[in-house]
Amino acid sequence: MTLSKNKIKFKLILSLITLLAILSFTISIFSAETSSIDEQIEQLRSIIDSSSYSAFQSRMILKTAQDLLESGIPFEDTKNVIENSVEKSLDAYSMKKVFDVILETQQEGIPTESLINKVNEGFAKNANKSVIISVIFTKAENLKKANEILNEALQEGLEINGEEEMVGILADSLENDVPQESLSWLVKTGAVKGSSIEEITEISEELSYLSLLAFDSGLSTENISLLFKEAMDNSSNISEICENIQKNLEAEISTAKIEEGGTAKPSTTTDSGTLPTSSTGSPTEVGETPTQEAGEAPTETGSAPEPSTSPAEEAPSPPEN
């Protein structure tokens, strides 16, 4: 009986010691992390102090930088953006805009590495601040759309391998003007067929190539979406779809070249009933007779006929007696 009680006491003491050890370990980790962030903020402060930012602007940037670090953005990434901003004389408010976009994307659970790479790429190319901000806003929107495509497939019970990598692949294709519905179809079809991430990447890159080709040929975003949709409606085989997109694109390019050359036109009238504009004049309404501009004499090659002479005028006068 006494032995049994001693065993119970020993187990209780052991459990208490284990619990205290876990608590101490957790507290030490938390303290280390807090200390680490404080040290990192001090490093960032020293970089900002070397700039021409005001005291208010410096505090504003440091506060946002701290939010980034606490949200999980790596210190080196945050540091690089600040260093580049200071070196390239990016104003504090533009830097905050960049940080806000990165932070918002991170808080939505979307990978931010590509965003940060875009910012640093812009600095490396000495891009204008408005261009950098515009590019990163567009990139963030494409990442959100890519994440929506992925979540939609997951909600339908489909298994997606390499979710984080997939978001980046889809965002790149969206940046190349591949229609969102086409990429949604690709992800769902690939998941159903058990396609690897490499296979989906390859097809996504091919669609990007075709989309860029279409855009460079002068097609609008709406026309590109329609071209992709028609190809996917007519087949479920990805090879046939890509082939059909290329064929339809070649036909569009061919038609555009004929129109530019002026050797043929797909139509001679429009919905409003006017003829196509010629290279030398304005359109003429159907049923309307062209008229000469007021105050202008007809040219030698003009369409106005010369007045005809009467038979009496053409006949010679009879001889006099």
Image (tube, rainbow, N blue to C red):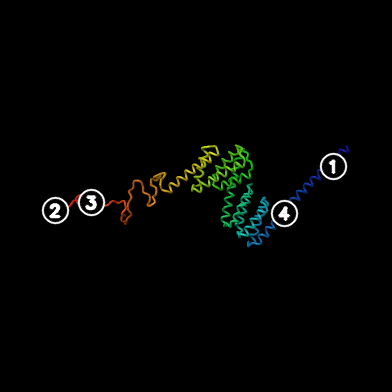
Q: How many numbered discs, if any?
A: 4
Q: Between tags 2 and 1, which lies in front?
A: 2
Q: Does label 2 or label 4 sit earlier along the sequence?
A: 4
Q: Position of residue 115 (x, y in %)?
A: 61, 51
Q: Earlier in the sequence, mark 3 or mark 4?
A: 4
Q: Residue at x 45, y 47 (%)?
A: 257
In the displayed structure, would residue 56 be above or below residue 222? below
Lower position in the chain sequence, tag 1 or tag 4: 1
**Residue 36 got which mark?**
4
Question: In front: 138, or 206?
Answer: 206
Mark pair 1, 3: CA separation? 136 Å
Which one is in front in this view, the residue at disc 1 or the one at disc 3?
3
Label 3 or label 2, whichever comes before in sequence order: 3
Q: Residues within 10 Å of mark 4 (few under 14, many from 20)?
A: few
Mark 2 residue crowding within 10 angstroms, few (<14) / some (14–19) / many (20+): few
Give me the C-alpha separation between circle 3 and circle 2. Answer: 22 Å
Q: Amino acid at mark 2?
A: Pro
> Which residue lies under the disc numbered 1?
10
Q: Residue 258, position in %: x, y? A: 43, 46
Residue 319 shows which numbered tag?
2
Amino acid under disc 4: Ser
State which mark lies toward you, 1 or 4. 4
* Residue at the image point whose x is 85% and y is 40% from the top: 7
Disc number placed over residue 297 in the picture, else none: none
Kind of residue at disc 1: Phe
As helix, strand or loop, the secondary structure at mark 2 comes to loop
Rendering coords of residue 213 (x, y %): 52, 47
Q: Mark 2 vs mark 4: give the one in front.
A: 2
From this viewpoint, which residue is outermost toward the right? 2
